[in-house]
């Protein structure tokens, strides 16, 4: 769901869904992209999950939306500042689950990284290029 998204478009691709997730780059144009207005377009039973970039979601607006029951909940694995400062409003928002930027650390993800490493070693030994990155 990445790609070019501009303000004025729905920040969440399917606003009528129960769970909203948007993966996009963090830059000056996307900072605070998901704000109180966008959250207000979601169902009251929706859950926002942010595993992309902390700055994409205005966390003060998200806390306010959760306090006012605009949406049902949130799951955050990334934050606008890491670690989030003690006392930040979002840390006290109801119906919110926090993970310490480790949401990618699953058994399946570990197996895939190990498999990719072994494939790269095998390809190198055989003189083949695999997943080449030029810097």
Image (spheres, grey):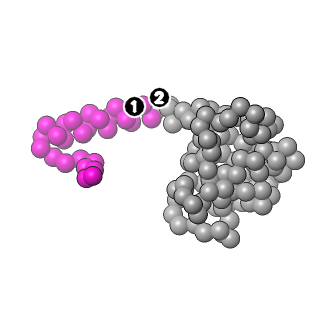
Count numbered badges in the picture.
2
As measured in the structure, the alpha-carbon distance from the residue carrying label 1 to the one carrying label 2 is 6 Å
Residue 106: tell me if it is visible: yes
Residue where numbered disc 2 is placed: 107
Query: Does 122 sit left or right of 89 as displayed?
Result: left
Residue 11 vs 52, above or below: the answer is below
Query: Does 11 sit left or right of 26 as displayed?
Result: right
The front one of 88 and 125 is: 88
Residue for point 61% across, 34% down: 83
Residue where numbered disc 1 is placed: 111
Which span of residues is magenta-colored? 109-135
The front one of 34 and 23 is: 34
Q: What is the magenta segment's predominant secondary structure?
A: helix
Res 75 quadrant in image: top right
**Rendered location of residue 52, percent (x, y):** 56, 48
Local crowd size for mark 2, using a 10 Å CA cut-off: few (<14), some (14–19), many (≥20): few
| Name of the residue lying farthest toward the right | 68
**Mark 1 element type:** helix
| Name of the residue lying farthest toward the top | 107
Residue 95: tell me if it is visible: no
The front one of 8 and 125 is: 8
Residue for point 19% across, 48% down: 129
Residue 114: in magenta span:
yes
Residue 44: in magenta span:
no
Q: Are marks 1 and 2 in contact (CB under 8 Å)?
A: yes
**Mark 2 element type:** helix
Residue for point 58% across, 66% down: 5
**Rendered location of residue 100, percent (x, y):** 59, 32
Res 117 quadrant in image: top left
Quarter of the image with the N terminus is: bottom right
Query: Does 78 sit left or right of 19 as displayed?
Result: left
């Amino acid at each position: 769901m990445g790609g070019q998204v501009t303000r004025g478009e729905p920040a969440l691709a399917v606003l009528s869904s129960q769970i909203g997730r948007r993966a996009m780059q963090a830059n000056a144009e996307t900072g605070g992209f998901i704000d109180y207005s966008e959250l207000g377009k979601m169902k009251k039973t929706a859950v926002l999950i942010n595993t992309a970039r902390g700055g994409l979601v205005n966390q003060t607006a998200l806390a306010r939306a959760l306090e006012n029951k605009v949406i049902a909940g949130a799951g955050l694995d990334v934050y606008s500042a890491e670690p989030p400062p003690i006392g930040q409003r979002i840390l006290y928002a109801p119906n919110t689950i926090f993970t310490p930027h480790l949401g990618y650390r699953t058994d399946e993800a570990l197996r895939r990284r190990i498999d990719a490493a072994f494939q790269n070693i095998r390809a190198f030994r055989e003189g083949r290029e695999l997943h080449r990155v030029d810097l």
